[in-house]
Image: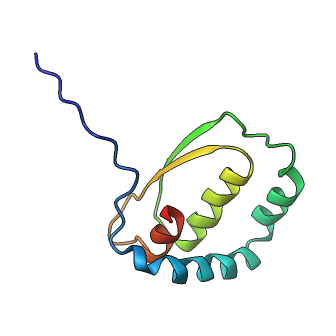
Amino acid sequence: MSTKTVAYVPNKVKDMSLAAWGRKEIELAEAEMPGLMSLREEYKDEQPLKGARIAGCLHMTIQTAVLIETLQALGAEVTWSSCNIFSTQDQAAAAIAA
């Protein structure tokens, strides 16, 4: 029985030049997502997710980017995969990978 070793790829983003656009959209979305933003503010010092390793597979949108950054702000190590190439917002993926 042979064993195949696969190299770790930190990200596979179509166009990293979209990161700045994605960052601007994330900042706009944060203003529309007060629940997540209040969680960040309330628990940023406590880091309740410190040590947690979270893997997600969900549509990679600007709103998902806000969720990912909230999990990270609360201390989690986050790895993400888009579940559908047709619903991926490339600017969101680029901003998160940057």
Residue 33 in the figure: left or right of residue 61: right
Residue 68 point in image, percent of width and height = 60, 57
Toward the top, the furthest residue is: 1
Residue at horizontal 49%, vertical 76%?
Answer: 19
Question: What residue sits 75% from the left and 62% below the top?
Answer: 36
Q: Quadrant of residue 67?
A: bottom right
Figure colour scheme: rainbow
In the picture, the quarter occupied by the N terminus is top left
Residue at position x 46%, y 63% in the image: 59
Residue 86 horizontal side relative to residue 72, left or right: left
Q: Position of residue 5 (x, y in %)?
A: 23, 31
How many numbered badges does the structure rendering display? 0
Position of 71 relative to 1 (above/below): below
Residue at x 86% of width, y 43% of height: 46
> Compared to 17, does 60 lie above or below?
above
Would you identify the image quadrant in which residue 25 lies? Answer: bottom right
Relative horizontal placement of residue 88, taking residue 66 as reference (left or right): left
Whole-percent x and y of residue 71? 67, 51
Relative to 3, say whether 7 is above or below: below
